Image: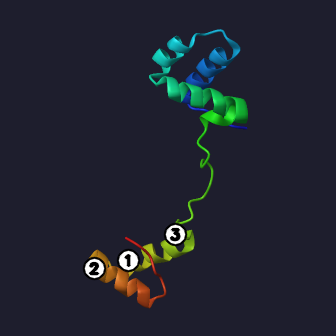
Amino acid sequence: MVKFSKREQLKLEIIVKVFTGLMSRQNAIHLLHCSERTLRRYLKDYKDRDILFVKHKNSNKIPPNQTDPQIKEMAQFLTKSKYYNFIVLHLQEKLKTHGLDIKR
């Protein structure tokens, strides 16, 4: 089941009305605050992907650069218990000695 925000629901409703001919393109442009080109893109996406066109294609995907939660938890534990008064760069060096190579 897909959940849509109010803005996504409004966009979907307007695009469906334009697609079926119940609303003019000019009214849709005015209501969506978009250009003619964007409206054409929305209509094409609706034709290709149906109602899922309002959702971003990367939604519900894990970012490739996300830090592993176990590594993050271990770094937080060490920071709070052992290295609580270190500056960021020094803390980064100390965590590397524990095998935790993390970014800021």
State the image coordinates of residue 18 (x, y, percent, origin top left).
63, 16
Dividing the picture into quadrants, the one containing residue 12 is: top right
Quarter of the picture containing the N terminus is top right
Amino acid at the residue labelled 1: Thr
Residue for badge 2: 86
Whether residue 42 is situated above or below residue 22 in the rendered picture = below
Task: Decide which of tag 2 and tag 1 comes sooner along the chain.
Answer: 1
Q: Which residue is mark 1?
A: 79
> Which of the 4 image quarters holds residue 81?
bottom left
Amino acid marked by disc 3: Thr
**Tags 3 and 1 in contact by the CB under 8 Å rule?**
no
Q: Position of residue 92 (x, y in %)?
A: 36, 80
Does the image show residue 3?
Answer: no
User: In this view of the protein, which residue sits in the foreground, 37 or 61?
Assistant: 37
**For marks 3 and 1 on the same chain, the one whose residue lies earlier in the sequence:** 3
In the rendered structure, are the residues bearing label 2 and label 1 in contact, judged by CB atoms less than 8 Å apart? Answer: yes
Which dot marks residue 44? none
Cα distance, mark 3 to mark 1? Answer: 16 Å
Q: Residue at x 50, y 72 (%)?
A: 73
Q: Residues within 10 Å of mark 2 (few under 14, many from 20)?
A: few
Q: Secondary structure at mark 3?
A: loop
79 horizontally vs 24: left or right: left
Q: Nearer the viewer, mark 2 or mark 3?
A: 3
- Alpha-carbon distance for marks 2 and 1? 8 Å
* Marking on residue 67: 3
| Snapshot colouring | rainbow
Query: Disc 2 versus disc 3: distance between alpha carbons?
Result: 21 Å
x then y, percent, for residue 19: 67, 18
Tag 2: residue type? Phe
- In terms of image quadrants, where is residue 104? bottom left
